[in-house]
Image: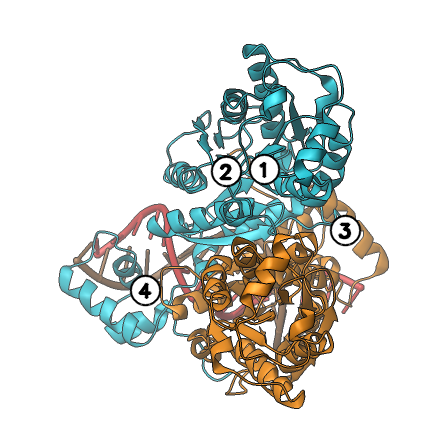
Chain colours: A cyan, B orange, C brown, D red
Amino acid sequence: MTKQNPTLADVARLAGVSQMTASRALNGRPGVSRETRDEITRIASDIGYVVNRTAQKLSGGRNGIIGIITPTLDTQFSSELILGAGRAARAGGCEVLVYTLSDDDRRTHHDVMGLMRQFSDGLLAILPRESLCLDSLASANLPVVVIDQRGTLNRFPSVSVDNYGGAQLAVDHLAELGHRRIAYLGGDELIEGVRDRQRGYHDALIRHGLPHDPELVVTGDLSQITAFEVASGLLAMPEPPTAIFTANDQSAFGVIAAVREAGLRVPNDISVIGFDDIPMAEQFHPALTTVRQPFQQMASSAVNTLLSQIAGFDAASQRITFPAELVVRDSTGPAPLELRRAVPAQAPRKSRMQRNGL
Amino acid sequence: MTKQNPTLADVARLAGVSQMTASRALNGRPGVSRETRDEITRIASDIGYVVNRTAQKLSGGRNGIIGIITPTLDTQFSSELILGAGRAARAGGCEVLVYTLSDDDRRTHHDVMGLMRQFSDGLLAILPRESLCLDSLASANLPVVVIDQRGTLNRFPSVSVDNYGGAQLAVDHLAELGHRRIAYLGGDELIEGVRDRQRGYHDALIRHGLPHDPELVVTGDLSQITAFEVASGLLAMPEPPTAIFTANDQSAFGVIAAVREAGLRVPNDISVIGFDDIPMAEQFHPALTTVRQPFQQMASSAVNTLLSQIAGFDAASQRITFPAELVVRDSTGPAPLELRRAVPAQAPRKSRMQRNGL
DNA sequence: GTGAAAGCGCTAACAA
DNA sequence: TTGTTAGCGCTTTCAC
């Protein structure tokens, strides 16, 4: 307890004005003469005054804080979004505070929402799955924007990528490379975006007149490790796919590991394509072909929507969708020649293993 | 603006007691009769009362919030630490809010510190490099614990891993495998922990009586991409190393990619060992041999130190160091036979390329 | 253009 | 065991 931090009262006293004048000056509000304002600003900076946002918020005003709620911090998916949101917020004169939903569900979502509401002017929710949070969010009467979850109940404005279209892009790419047996490794069915990707996969298959073998549709949990296991099963099929489309990049990494483990090569024997285009995708070996989500744009669009809501505009029913983009790198290639046109009845496994042994 | 959130006054009124009694009851303070307390608790939960931590903080009390300051969110290094800290904090009845230092330095560190101070009871700073933040932190008179940075100025209690010893573990392992030409790929020299790792590498080399070739000590920036480039240079040397120790796992991934690119294999031709043991290390292919930092323990130890400081105990000079642990996986193996005992004068590159071509 | 008063929701400190 | 008073630092409202 050396010395207290300077408060608005200190600034006011030193400047010989009332607190209100100081407040107005420092916040750029009208009603202060040019000279007074300059003087106050100078003094404030001299004594190192920093507004107390806690008090600011409590007294009914805004405090320039945007809260971000994210289910997890350890995926590049969320870090990218948070990074982008932070940039956009700062550009809009706000700071960002992140709250991670606890892995244990001990704490009720309601409490968390309450907490964030008290701290911030508005909330950005990264909620891939139809979370219970939505209910708590609804009861909080403060601006909310949801990322990656349009939601069935249209309660909040949302920003997401065109998952359906993106998945089609992936299948198109594979089909053009001559693949016919294209597998899909999905994730948690509760995640709206993931469901859309699967629909996109399915519809694109039909559009290309490709067989739609239910055995080629498998489910993971968006983690690399699970993808590895699930993909291993896929590769052990009597008639394995020549290409695997995964619901996210992380899964694609697991698939590639599984392909290697099976003694096959990517993309020579099996093509793999992911979804997201997290930074790691480019650095992976082989560099991952994937469908890009424009994280930066999504984040800044979400922040801007939030900011305009905070400013009092109604954006309640806004649904922003960004197009996905195919990013071709090294993990996809032409389908093996002998499988390109028709799917032979006999298991192609052997011949491929041989080729690989060269 | 549907309806205001319930406040302590509401609870008190409904319970027919004063605000203070309600406050005491809800905070588990002594001085409230059993029945009154139960009744108040019931009512509070009935009307969905959630304490306003902003007001709580403003009124001079604690608010059960721990602020975490991290330079970045997109490394598993920091996510692991934050995850662990969150768990520990919650176990101690606190919530955690994360602030990411902006990538642009527009905002002064001082402002950020001010902000966090207002919001929280104490700060956990993940500051790998000797940051300017330390100065700002010092001026904030609230508990601070620093992770991964013992600091030259002994200002704050800190928690870190034994970087020096960990690096020696890595070199010991390599030396036991018969490696003689062991390279070190470091990172930012400003990072204290990284400097310690280099010292450990150097001293261990001497201890093992191994040659200390300055050419084998190169510097990256802890990123995978840079490591790839730097390692490529290392491999192109007339007399390349047979093992590479990197300052972090991320760099090791880049090195492995470079080794592959050069047509060599890990660990047959080149052994690679990292530092950190981030989750990705285990899932990488080949699974990475590395030196583990006990993130969970470090984080919870840091939180506990912080908590005790908040409780009023003095921990100003506390320095906690955790031992590092060698985790042997698949990226290290015996040194190539012909290089195991002595370092031949002629370039060994050719013979290794041949072996690889088998 | 400026200031005074009141209060945001809560908790210390002191009564009773 | 309980209540009263005061005030955290700021902004709103309304007066000058």
Q: CB atoms at circles 3 and 2 under 8 Å apart?
A: no
Q: CA distance from mark 4 to mark 3?
A: 39 Å
Tell me the residue that label 1 is attached to.
A137
Q: CA distance from mark 3 to mark 1?
A: 23 Å
* Along the viewing direction, whichever of B327 and B104 lies nearer the viewer: B327
Q: Are marks 3 and 2 on the same chain?
A: no
Establish if B142 lies above or below A187: below
Neighbours of disc 4 within 10 Å: few (<14), some (14-19), many (20+)? some
Q: CB atoms at circles 4 and 3 under 8 Å apart?
A: no
User: On residue B41, which mark appears?
Assistant: 3
Residue B292 location (% of width, % of height): 69, 68
Residue A353 location (% of width, % of height): 71, 34
Left or right of B203 in this view: A88 = left
Q: Residue at x 22, y 51 (%)?
A: A30
User: On residue A144, which mark appears?
Assistant: 2
Q: CB atoms at circles 2 and 1 under 8 Å apart?
A: yes
Q: CA distance from mark 2 to mark 1?
A: 7 Å
In front of the other: label 3 or label 2?
Answer: 2
Residue type at mark 4 is Gln
Dividing the picture into quadrants, the one containing residue B142 is bottom right
Tell me the residue that label 4 is attached to.
A19
